[in-house]
Image (tube, helix red, strand yellow):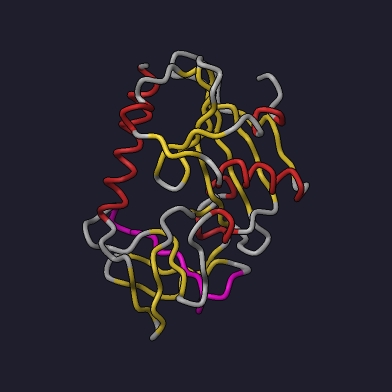
């Protein structure tokens, strides 16, 4: 229960941060971009300056071209002065790019990390990875067909174990979609995909080694 409360607090913090980004759309070098809220940088690869090039500025935000991506289609905005209301922050895509959900992201690789409960001293660790497209598709489909569940109901779920699932795409290098995956003590499975909680089937558990 404590873990669920913690998850709710963290989720609320994410919403607050996203809420600070009032620039759902920006115009940079005469191109209009839209904020993509469920896609982020793959920070496990390092900070943006390691695989991106600064190409301009919007207010207090530095605008970066990401290596391997066309800056006329996707850019990343990074705040130089910390989070500030109304400043662009995150991944932005032009109208030519349709990134509405995980399917549009076209995952080609996934990684699953074991996420220790707050009472445990061990660190998060990678327990499964694959670029087998059949497996990636199965897991993607499992999440996409999930049933929405309210925060109120989710708060009543007692967590047995928690994981982080990260999807990568060969079409979008250095970007990822990250989701929480929860196995409840009720032997049911849940994910916090695209800003909402979902109840899903046991497909993912079939590929997870006992941590």
Q: Is residue 72 magenta?
A: yes
Which is more toward the observer, 35 or 45? 35
Percent from the top left, x then y, of residue 168? 63, 52
Percent from the top left, x then y, of residue 134? 76, 47
Check the image and name the residue furthest to the left. Answer: 85
Apparent side of residue 69 relative to residue 186 in the rendered image (left or right): right
Q: Is 178 placed above or below 4 here?
A: below
Residue 81 picture quarter: bottom left
Which residue lies at the image location 59% right of the left edge and 56% below the top edge? Answer: 103
Percent from the top left, x then y, of residue 29? 40, 84
Q: Quadrant of the N terminus?
A: top left
Which is more toward the observer, 86 or 133? 133
Which residue lies at the image location 35% right of the left edge and 34% below the top edge? Answer: 150
Q: Looking at the image, how many numbered discs can be counted on the residues?
A: 0
Which residue lies at the image location 63% right of the left edge and 35% below the top edge? Answer: 112
Residue 5 picture quarter: top left
Which residue lies at the image location 69% right of the left edge and 19% below the top edge? Answer: 210
Which is more toward the observer, 162 or 202? 202
Percent from the top left, x then y, of residue 127? 68, 29
Which is more toward the observer, 160 or 9? 160
Q: Is 14 placed above or below 68 here?
A: above
Query: Magenta residues?
Result: 69-82
Apparent side of residue 198 relative to residue 68 in the rendered image (left or right): left
Q: Quadrant of the C terminus?
A: top right
Q: Is 202 placed above or below 17 here?
A: above
């Amino acid at each position: 229960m404590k873990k669920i409360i913690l998850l709710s607090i963290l989720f609320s913090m994410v919403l607050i941060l996203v809420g600070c980004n009032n620039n759902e759309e920006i115009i940079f070098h005469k191109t209009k971009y839209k904020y993509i809220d469920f896609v982020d940088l793959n920070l496990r690869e390092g900070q943006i300056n390691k695989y991106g090039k600064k190409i301009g500025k919007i207010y207090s935000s530095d605008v970066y071209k990401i290596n391997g991506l066309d800056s006329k289609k996707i850019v990343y905005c990074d705040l130089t002065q910390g989070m500030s209301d109304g400043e662009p922050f995150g991944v932005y895509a032009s109208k030519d790019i349709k990134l509405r959900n995980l399917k549009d992201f076209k995952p080609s690789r996934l990684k699953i990390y074991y996420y220790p409960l707050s009472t445990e001293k061990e660190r998060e660790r990678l327990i499964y990875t694959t670029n087998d497209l059949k497996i990636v598709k199965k897991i993607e489909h499992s999440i996409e067909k999930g049933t929405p569940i309210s925060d109120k109901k989710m708060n009543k779920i007692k967590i047995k174990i928690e994981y982080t699932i990260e999807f990568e795409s060969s079409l979008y290098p250095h970007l990822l979609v990250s989701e929480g995956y929860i196995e409840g003590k009720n032997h049911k499975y849940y994910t916090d995909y695209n800003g909402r909680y979902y109840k899903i089937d046991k497909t993912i558990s079939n590929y997870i080694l006992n941590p």
